[in-house]
Amino acid sequence: MSDAPTGSGRVAEMTWPEIETALEETRTLLVPVGSTEQHGRHLPLGVDAYMPEAIGERVTERSPALLAPPVWYGVSPHHTFKPGTFTVSTETFQRYLFDICASAGEWGIENVLLLNGHYLAQDPELEVVVRRLRSEADLDAFHVPLVNVFADAAEEIRTGEVSFHASEFETSIMLALFPELVHMDRAERVDPPAESLPLTDYDALGENAVGWSLTARDMDELTPAGNIGDPTVATAEKGRALVEAAVSDICLLVDELGE
C-alpha cells in the first residue's frame, strides 16, 4: 500500500506516513494566521482565517509546501465592540504560535511562512514570533501579511478611496473565494474621519509612517456598521486579481526555499 500524499498539502487531512513521504519533497510549512472578529454587517467573522487558508491552498497546488490548519484566534481587542469577536493577549498569541511552529520543526519542517490575514493589527506580534523562531527554534521563518503581497494589484484595481477594514479589498477577496458567505445587500459605505493624524492614514495601503492602534471605543465611534471604507465597490473580479497576486508572490518565495 502506498504512503504517497493524497491531498492538496493540507496537513490535517494527511496521515503521518503521508507527511513522512511529503517531507522528501518539501520542508516548507504555510501557517494561515487570522482572527475571528466582526467584519461589518456583510462579511462573516472568519474572514481573516478564510483568506490566508484559501490562498495557502492555492500556493500548495503550484509550489512544494505543506499547509497547516489555520490559527483562528488573534489579537483583536479593538473589535470587541461587536458580538462574536474573540481576542487573546499578545503574550498568549505569541507563545501559542511559536509552539505550533517549533513543534513542526521537531518533525522535519525547516521553513515556516506565517500567512497573516489579520494584517496591520497583529503585525507587531508576528514580527516578534518570526524573530524568536529564527533565533530559538532554528527555523527560517517569514511573516507574510497578505496586504503586502497583493498591494501592487490593489493599487491598480481599487476604485474606493479608502479600504481599511472589511471594505473593498477583503470583500472582493471573499466574493472571489467564498461568495456564499458574503451579503452584498447589507454592505454599506462608512467614511473615516475627514482628516487623520499626521503620519497616519485610515487605509490599508495608506502612508502609515508611525505605529498606532485603535481601541474598541475608537472603533465604536468610527463605525456603527463595523467596517471602515466602501465595500459596495467590491467585485469578484477584483478579488481574483488580489488572490492571484498574493499566490504568485508567495510561490516565488516558496520555490526559492525549495531550491
Image: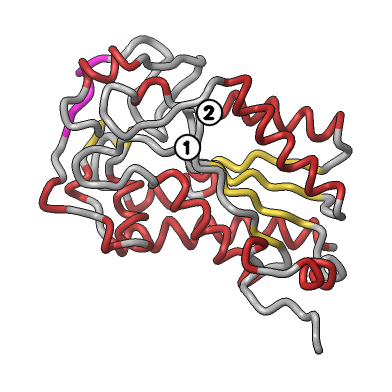
Q: Which mark is residue 122?
A: 2
For mark 2, does the 10 Å Cα neighbourhood hold few (<14), some (14 to 19), or many (20 or more) residues?
many
Query: Which residue is at the front of the view, 185 or 159?
Result: 185
For mark 1, does the 10 Å Cα neighbourhood hold few (<14), some (14 to 19), or many (20 or more) residues?
many
Which amino acid type corresponds to the residue marked 1 in the rendered image?
Answer: His
CA separation in Å, label 2 and label 1: 6 Å
Q: Is the residue 149 above or below the residue 196 in the image?
A: below
| Residue behind mark 1 | 118
Helix, strand or loop for disc 2:
loop
Q: Residue 77 vs residue 145: left or right?
A: left
Residue at 70% x, 62% y is 66
* Quarter of the picture holding the N terminus: bottom right
- Highlighted magenta segment, given as a residue range: 190-195
Main secondary structure of the magenta stretch: loop
Residue 38 placement (x, y as % from top left): 31, 35
Residue 20: quadrant of the picture: bottom right
* Quarter of the picture holding the C terminus: bottom right
Residue at 51% x, 45% y is 146
Residue at 59% x, 46% y is 115
Residue 43 placement (x, y as % from top left): 27, 47
Which amino acid type corresponds to the residue marked 2 in the rendered image?
Answer: Gln
Residue 229 on the magenta segment: no
Query: Which residue is at the front of the view, 170 or 9?
Result: 9
Residue 155: quadrant of the picture: top left
* Circles 2, 1 touching at the beta carbon (< 8 Å): yes
